Image: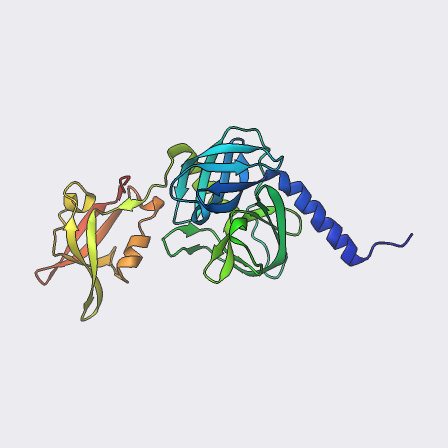
Amino acid sequence: MTEPTTLASLSSALAETVARTAPAIVSVHSHRLRASGFVWKPGLVVTADEALADEGEVEIELADGSSRQATVAGRDHTTDIALLRFDGDAAPVKLSTEKPALGSLAVVVAADRGAPTARLGMVSRSGPAWRSLRGGEIDARVELDIRLRHSQQGGLALNAAGEAFGMAVLGPRRVLTIPAATIARVAAQLETRGRIARGYLGVGLQPVRLDDGFGAMVMNVDKAGPAAAAGIRQGDVIVAVNGERLAGVRALSRSLGPQSVGTVVELTVHRGGEPQNFKVTIGERPET
C-alpha cells in the first residue's frame, strides 16, 4: 500500500475540517433572501446583516435538516452583524481571535438550503483595525481570495488548523471577514441590549468649505440633546474637535462610536465670525 501524497493528505485534512464545522452552520431564510449563519451560543445564531431582510419572518435550517422559526435579537448595520434567537440546542462553534497570516489557506464553510458548502482560497490581505463605510469598528481587515455566493454570506472563515477566525461577507469587489473579536464584542451587546450604543450630539450638520479648511454648519439642534445643553446654536460652524481641525462631517460622525458615549469633547465653533469653545458630553443616540 502506497503512502498518501501530500496533496491527498491536504485534501483529507480539509474535508475533516469542513465536517467538524458543518454541524454549527445554518441556512437563514428571510423574506426572499437566503444567507448562511452559525450557532454562536446555544439558541443564538450570528449571520450577515446585509443578507438579512428588513422585515418579515426569519427561518433557519439546521445541519440536521430541521427548521426553526427565529426572531431578530438585534442587528448592527455598521459591522454587518445580526443576531438571531431560536429554540434549539445545536452546538455552538468556538471562535479564534488569532488573525490569519497573509497568504495562508482559508476555507469558508457555509450552507445552502440546509446543505453544507465549502470554498477554498487564501488570505489576500491581513491588516490592522479599520472603520467600515457606515462607521463600524472592525478589529482587523482580513480579505479572502474566494468567490462567494449571496447565500454563503454569514458562513465561517477557517484557517488551515480548522479554527474559525471570522464571518465571511461580501464587500465591494472582494470577500471580507468580520473578525471573531468584532463578533464577540458586537454580538454580546446585541444579546443583552438588542442594539449597539452610538454617540449622539443632537445636531444636524451640513459641510461647508472655509478659507482655511472645512467646517460643519449646524442646521438644526435637538433642544433636548447634548449640543443644546452645552450652548450650541443653529448657524454655528464647528471647525475643530478637541483642538484638532475638522476633517469633515463624515469624520465627525464616525467618531461617535460606542466608546464615545459619556465622554466630554471640546468643540470649537465660529459664531458671528468669532471662535468659541464649548464642552459637550456625548449622549447616546435614541432609538428610531
- As drawn, 74 above or below 102: above
At x 50% / y 61%, what residue is drawn?
Answer: 174
Tell me if I can see residue 111 in this picture.
yes
Q: List the single residue furthest toward the right.
A: 1
Q: List the single residue furthest toward the left.
A: 272
At x 40% / y 55%, what residue is drawn?
Answer: 131
Give the quadrant of residue 92: top right
Left or right, 120 with respect to 170, comes to right
Image coordinates for residue 98, horizontal then vertical, percent: 57, 49
Image coordinates for residue 163, horizontal then vertical, percent: 62, 46
Give the quadrant of residue 5: bottom right
Image coordinates for residue 186, horizontal then vertical, percent: 43, 42
Left or right, 87 with respect to 10, comes to left
Left or right, 129 with respect to 93, comes to left
Tell me if I can see residue 106 in this picture.
no
- As drawn, 161 above or below 124: above
Q: List the single residue furthest toward the front.
A: 32
Q: Quadrant of the C terminus?
A: top left
Q: Nearer the viewer, residue 162 or 174?
A: 174
At x 36% / y 53%, what residue is drawn?
Answer: 135
> What is the image's colouring?
rainbow
Q: Nearer the viewer, residue 75 or 29?
A: 29
Image coordinates for residue 101, horizontal then vertical, percent: 60, 57
How many numbered marks are there? 0
